[in-house]
Image (spheres, grey):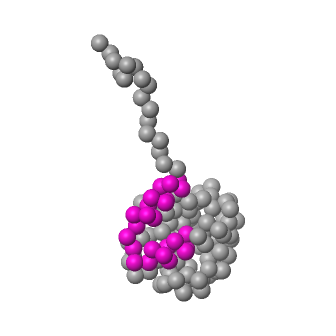
Amino acid sequence: MPTKKDQEPKTKPKKPSDEEQVAEYMEQLQHPLKAEIEAVRKIIKGANPAIKERIKWNAPSYYTSADLLTFNHRLQTKVHLIFHHIAIVQIASDLLEGDYKDRRMMYFADMADVEAKKEVLERILNEYVGLVG
């Protein structure tokens, strides 16, 4: 005989929001440059209101109408950003490293480096958003 519990509709557990997923990721992150990663995240999120944050490819990632960039947390000696939309190759900056046909890298050695590159990163992000939409 069915019990009252059997008759109750089953509810799916609520999926955490993008913000909750990123907050949980950052809380659990074990990285020697965690403070620098947080500082770079703040710069990215503040550079342009169209940029959204989520976890993709097992790391904080940023997007508008398309995926723009992702942290690569495997490198333990620097903060490593991967700009992976092909539009990035149209942006001129000595801070964008690599001669790939469809992506560029940016690195930060420490907090002083983050601060020194802040304005250029903001310019790159706004130009990038303008190209990608």
Number of numbered callouts drawn: 0
Q: Give 105 or 35, whichever is nearer the viewer.
A: 35
Q: Position of residue 91 (x, y in %)?
A: 64, 75
Of all residues shown, which one is farthest toward the front?
4
x, y percent for residue 78: 44, 80
Residue at image x 54%, y 66%?
Answer: 69
Q: Is residue 59 left or right of residue 48?
A: left
Q: Residue at x 43, y 64 (%)?
A: 27
Q: Nearer the viewer, residue 104 or 29?
A: 29
Q: Position of residue 53 (x, y in %)?
A: 56, 60
Q: Residue at position x 67%, y 76% from top?
A: 123
Residue 72 covered by magenta stretch: no
Answer with the quarter of the image where residue 25 lies: bottom left
Q: Is residue 22 above or below residue 99?
A: above
In the displayed structure, 92 sits above or below 5; it is below
**Residue at position x 40%, y 78% from top?**
32
Q: Does residue 119 appear in this view? A: yes
Is residue 39 part of the magenta span, yes or no? Answer: yes
**Foreground of the two, 75 or 101:** 75
Q: Quadrant of the N terminus?
A: top left
Q: Residue 84: image x %, image y %?
A: 52, 66
Please identify the quadrant where the C terminus is shown. bottom right
Give the residues drawn in magenta, as a range: 18-41
Instruction: Work out whether residue 104 can be spotted.
Output: no
Q: Is residue 52 toward the left or the right of residue 13 in the image?
A: right
Q: Looking at the image, which residue sits at the far left? A: 1
Which residue is most to the top? 1
Main SS of the magenta part reads helix
The image quarter in which residue 5 lies: top left
